Image (cartoon, helix red, strand yellow):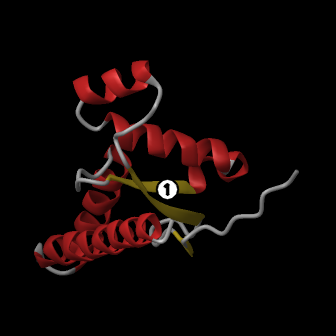
Amino acid sequence: YVEEARLDVASSDPSTGAPIFMDTVVYCCHTTDHGRLLSRARHDGKAAADAAAAKRRRYPDAGTSLIPLPFEAGGRPGTDTLNFVRRCGAMYSESHNGDKSIYSRLWHDASTTLQIANAELIISAIGK
């Protein structure tokens, strides 16, 4: 069985020209696996880290070109997401005389994406 999937964004790294593939995911902390549930309860960001790991397993051929952009359903961004926003913000700021306004725009866009995904989760749950 081959599962076909589509990454959210395919682009190129502006500094190197190398291909990059971004894929967002929203993970709920809840799980029926008791050990994993305890781990997520004890470690901030564990669900987002699990989500990023799942994306890397899903797209193993992408290697370092894959940038998972995980969020926990409550809003916590994963480490990959934080690093990506910081990297983009730093690059923009460097090329725009230290202008840091892009950070708020990036977090606004990320928040909007998260809220849309949460709404989709709720709608799909109601439909069942």
Residue in the picture at 41% in, 21% down: 34
Give above or below for 46 relative to 104: above
Q: Is mark 1 on a helix, strand or loop?
A: strand
Q: Which residue is drawn at 54% across and 71% down?
A: 8
* Residue 62 as seen in the image, left or right of residue 78: right
Q: Quick check: 61 left or right of 100?
A: right
14 and 85: which one is in front?
85
Residue type highlighted by circle 1:
Ile
Quarter of the figure with residue 65: bottom right
According to the image, label 1 marks what residue? 67
Q: In this view, does 124 lie above or below 1?
A: below
Instruction: Identify the image quadrant of residue 94.
Output: bottom left
Seen in the picture, residue 127 relative to 87 is either above or below; the reply is below
Question: What residue is drawn where x is 47% and y is 69%?
Answer: 124
Query: Where is residue 24 shown, x and y percent of the image?
Result: 45, 62
Estimate the x, y position of residue 83 in percent, counting from the top left: 31, 52
x and y percentages locating residue 56 in the rendered image = 59, 45
The residue shown at (56%, 74%) is 11
Q: Residue furthest top?
A: 35
Q: In this view, does 108 lie to the left or right of 18?
A: left
Measuring from the top left, give residue 76's x and y in whole percent: 23, 50
Mark 1: few/some/many CA within 10 Å (<14, 14-19, 20+) = many
On the picture, is 78 further left or further right than 111? right
**Front in this rendered view, residue 127 or 122:** 127
